[in-house]
Image: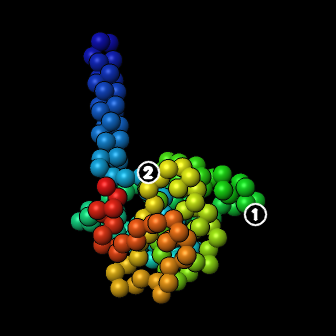
Amino acid sequence: MGGGSGGSWSRLGDIRSLEEKAKQALQGGKRNVFISFATEDMNEVNLLRAHAKNENSDIEFNDHSVREPYNSDRAAYIKEKIAERIQRSSVCVVYLSDSTKQSNWVKWEVEESLRQGKKVVGVHPQGKAPVANPTWVREYGLKVVNWSDLPTELK
């Protein structure tokens, strides 16, 4: 009778220990990042996400961006949900391409990030800078870096 209950307490302690280790691993040195991008750039952004998951990569972050469009045509609802994700992040990384300047959503996400006091950094792959950045990149004084320089900017 006494031996059975002792084992369950031990297992409970093991589970709590594992939970704590998992939490530390998830947050250990990683920044919570919101990635803002035009939908036309989804494939490139997915490469950035995959690169960050590679254990040999210098880029480490927890991605809080939206992976799929919210199922709503109501702009206020969509903005509310995106603002919640931005709130959970410490940095907004804006993927810059020739498609970015046509996206009103990217501009709004940058403005919302700045309104919330978040650091905002523009990024593009090495050798694939857009022909011209949107005017608001300069207006808001955003730093723009190559993809390979992003780890330094996330610190």
What residue is at 62 percent from the left and 78 percent from the top? 102
**What residue would you read off at disc 1?**
73
Marks 2 and 1 sit apart, C-alpha to C-alpha, by 28 Å
Tell me which colouring the rendered structure shows: rainbow
Q: Is residue 142 left or right of residue 99?
A: left
What residue is at 27 percent from the left and 66 percent from the top? 57
Marks 2, 1: nearer the viewer: 2
* Quarter containing the N terminus: top left
**Visible in this render: residue 146?**
yes
**Visible in this render: residue 43?**
no
Amino acid, disc 1: Asp
Residue 54 pos. (x, y %): 30, 65
What residue is at 42 percent from the left and 64 percent from the top? 121
The secondary element bearing badge 1 is classed as: loop
**What residue would you read off at disc 2?**
90
Residue 2 pos. (x, y %): 29, 12
Residue 85 pos. (x, y %): 54, 52
The secondary element bearing badge 2 is classed as: loop
Query: In front: 104, or 24?
Result: 104
Q: Quadrant of residue 38?
A: bottom right
